[in-house]
Amino acid sequence: MNAFLIDAFEYSRHKEQRQGDIAVADLVRLTEELADKSGSLHWSLLGEVDSLGFSQLRLSVSGLVRLMCQRCLVPFAFEIASDSRLILAKDEANADEIDALLADDTVDVIVGSKVLNVAELIEDEALLAIPLAPKHKACPDRAAPERLQGAQKPSPFAVLKNIKQ
Ligand SMILES: [Zn+2]
């Protein structure tokens, strides 16, 4: 796919805003965790400078993907709806400083780059949003529909009996 690169600090400073859709099939690391490559993810990226003067990116990623249930091995749809606030650090040392300063688990500090790959950022976000061991809330019981059918369908003999009457 086309690399989508931004200068992260400039993007924040100019409060740029972009959005788009990206095919799941283009996100190779993500597809390895999924049942299939169908669908696409909608994303939006907003640049900001927060009240403390930190450059930051707000990234939203949403869309339906199909995960494989680890319990019954039947795929199911999973909705990704993720929002994060990524504070931009100048380098690794600066990232540690900001992390310690904020002591806030709801924000992520990343090393900002002049060539930040947005597709990679979207993919990381999606990977974090899906469960490590995906499972149905309640696995479909494959025997259940047959039992139900047996109970509801009158036996041919019962039908015959009704005709005779
Ligand atoms: Zn299941």
Image: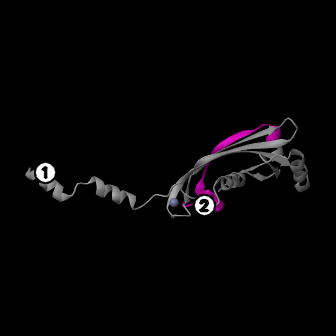
Query: Residue sitting at 72 percent across and 39 percent down?
Result: 17
Q: In which quarter of the image is residue 143?
A: bottom left
Disc 2 marks a residue whose amino acid type is: Thr
Instruction: Rate crowding at label 2 as few (under 14), some (14 to 19) or many (20 or more) other CA atoms within 10 Å.
Output: some
Compared with residue 8, is residue 53 higher up or lower down, i.e. above or below?
above
Residue 128 vs residue 119, the one in the foreground:
128
Q: What element carries label 1?
A: helix
Mark 1 or mark 2: name the one nearer the start of the chain. 2
Highlighted range, magenta: 11-38
Where does residue 30 sit, x and y in percent of width and height?
A: 64, 59
**Does the segment drawn in magenta span residue 21?**
yes
Query: Residue sitting at 77 percent across and 46 percent down?
Result: 106
Where does residue 24 sit, x and y in percent of width and height?
A: 59, 55
Nearest to the eye among marks 1 and 2: give it: 1
Can residue 37 be seen by looking at this rendering? no
Can you name the residue that lies furthest to the left here?
Answer: 164
Quarter of the figure with the N terminus: bottom right
Instruction: Rate crowding at label 1 as few (under 14), some (14 to 19) or many (20 or more) other CA atoms within 10 Å.
Output: few
Residue 33 vs residue 154, the one in the foreground:
154
Where does residue 123 sit, x and y in percent of width and height?
A: 68, 54
| Residue carrying label 2 | 31
141 to the left or right of 165: right
| Residue carrying label 1 | 162
Where does residue 13 sit, x and y in percent of width and height?
A: 83, 39
Can you name the residue that lies furthest to the top here?
Answer: 51
8 to the left or right of 39: right
Disc 1 marks a residue whose amino acid type is: Asn
CB under 8 Å between callouts 1 and 2? no
Residue 18 vs residue 80, the one in the foreground:
80
| Mark 1 to mark 2 CA distance (whole Å) | 56 Å
